[in-house]
Amino acid sequence: MPVLNSDIARSLEKLADLIELEGGNPFRIRAYRNAARIVGELPRNVLAMTEAGENLAELPGIGKDLADKIETLAETGHIAVLDEMERKTPPGLLALLDLPGLGPKRVRALYDRLGIRSLSELAAAAKSGKVRDLPGFGEKTEKRILQEAEKRSAMTPRIKRPVAEDVAEPLLKYLRAGNRVEQAAIAGSYRRRRETVGDLDIVVAGAKGRDIIERFVAYEDVRQILAQGPTRSSVVLRNGMQVDLRVVSPATYGAALMYFTGSKAHNIALRGIAAGRGLKLNEYGLFDGTHRIAARTEEEVYRAFGLPYIEPELREDHGEIEAARHGRLPHLVTLADMRGDLHAHTTESDGRASARDMAQAARDRGYSYLAISDHSKRVTVAHGLDAARLARQIDEIARLNETLTGFTVLRSVEVDILDDGRLDLPDDILARLDFVVGAIHSAFDLPRDKQTSRLLKAMDNPHLSVLAHPTGRLIEERRGCDFDVERVLAGARERGVALEVNGQPDRLDLNEWHCKLAKEMGVKLALSTDAHSTAELGFMRYAVDQARRGWLEPGDIVNTRDLAGLRRLLRR
Ligand code: DGT
Ligand code: CA
Ligand code: CA
């Protein structure tokens, strides 16, 4: 993953905190804090700057030593001095430092005076009223610390998209139906279409904030009200998900939507640009002194920066502002661009519908083709097909195609890639298919060089056209296997193999970073659902989300083509 300026700033800030916690040199502490602020406000990615030959030591307050550290952070995400400090600081204290409202001074005081070294010790001390009497704390601080400490220890994992959508969309509909509501949208990571979300951030434009908030907290799915004010509120829904709501005036809706859509890194980058022009950007608009230049719509705010509209999926400070400035924003793929699905299962292996039903459902979605790619024999739990069963399926699909007009079922297989990189079925049967999808289902933990050679060897087989869910990761469950992504991508390009973006919401594999890298390296992508039922054909939109976050355009994707174009691309 590329290192963001905000990551570098956070590391420097952390370093300053740890030195302060240790009672270190105040000048050093100040120098790191200053550097963190400067890096955080830079309009461009540090790595891009150094690669363009710019000298960081020329920035105000940044000497040679700091510039070196920043560069190392940009390249590797680490610096030795911070790693060392983190090693020698007790882990409990690190967790305390991460608590909002607790800087190094306070953590130090808690440790020195009350011996507190962990979140649970802190929660206990706050509960028994011992914290309020420390100098610099007080009753209000103690209460806030207790809330945060309890929230932290009950922290839930990030929520996958379908779960978030199931609660978010009905809630949005409910809010939109309210009195005096002009506009409403879910902002935050949800709108940027990240694969998981931490919480929901909703922005509503309307008069009578109080009434809108009243209606919000009265929603039937609300389990707990965390905060309720005239223009903002936070609640927890019954599934444990937190929702933050902001009510703003219609005149500043665009600025608020932009602010709460984030990402934070994107916002900070834009604020830096504004500051460079003597302007100010916040959730109320773009300002020149007290004069509001733009706020009503996002388009208007971007325009005031001299920029075209930037799609939420791109707002990660990964070069989108630079691209916008030079008119080089990608024309992101949409669901409507997809002409077919290239990976689906049937009852022959572990699917729940017949090839005919899957074809009918794909056709109903407006596609012109669907590949049936059941498992091969090695995947016994999924009743994988051997050569004889696959041969029968090939004939069956030929007969099925005779009954269909304007739609084609492609004969494929998800052939298992064996541990040594050979394929699980003989070449003569693979040669009879329209194309072959290959995937690994075992030996995820091979060492890096072995895994890399395994994938390259699999792609050496001239029948293999698509590498499915290449890393094998399961979101929040299993890390992807370790291989040299750049070598595999280069190998795919040389051999004309497309890499899959698997739309299963717990896979989304390749991920957005790999999509972007693949595009930059000239590798084509296949967006597929890996559907095991007719309903799962609908997972295409998750693949499209991931592709959009990876900057993909229709031209980068094989199944935006008509059947003839697709066949040309899949032929090696
Ligand atoms: P999540 O909830 O962890 O999946 O990620 P987000 O991006 O939804 O983050 P969240 O909910 O903490 O905040 C929502 C948006 O509000 C975030 O994307 C940008 C904006 N925001 C929050 N805090 C700050 C901040 O300190 N500075 C700036 N510039 N923007 C912020
Ligand atoms: Ca959020
Ligand atoms: Ca939030």
Image: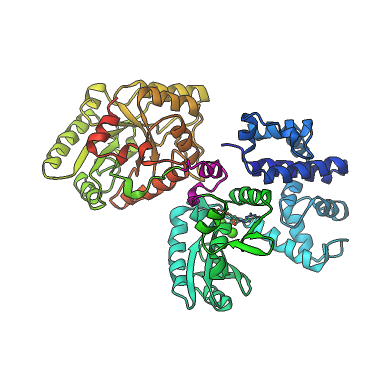
Q: Is residue 431 magenta?
A: no
Q: Position of residue 201 (x, y in %)?
A: 55, 61
Question: Please, is residue 364 above or below residue 250 in the view?
Answer: above
* Total count of labels: 0
Nearer the observer, 102 or 229 = 229
Q: Is residue 195 visible?
A: no
Q: Quadrant of the N terminus?
A: top right
| Left or right position of 432 against 29 | left
Q: Residue at x 33, y 51 (%)?
A: 538
The part of the chain drawn in magenta is 308-329
Nearer the observer, 152 or 74 = 74
Q: Give ligand 3's quarter of the image.
A: bottom right
Question: Please, is residue 493 above or below residue 206 in the view?
Answer: above
Q: Position of residue 415 (x, y in %)?
A: 32, 31
Question: Please, is residue 240 above or below residue 388 in the view?
Answer: below
Question: Please, is residue 216 above or below residue 13 in the view?
Answer: below
Q: Position of residue 76 (x, y in %)?
A: 64, 32
Q: Is residue 316 magenta?
A: yes
Q: Residue at x 56, y 71 (%)?
A: 249
Q: Residue at x 45, y 71 (%)?
A: 176
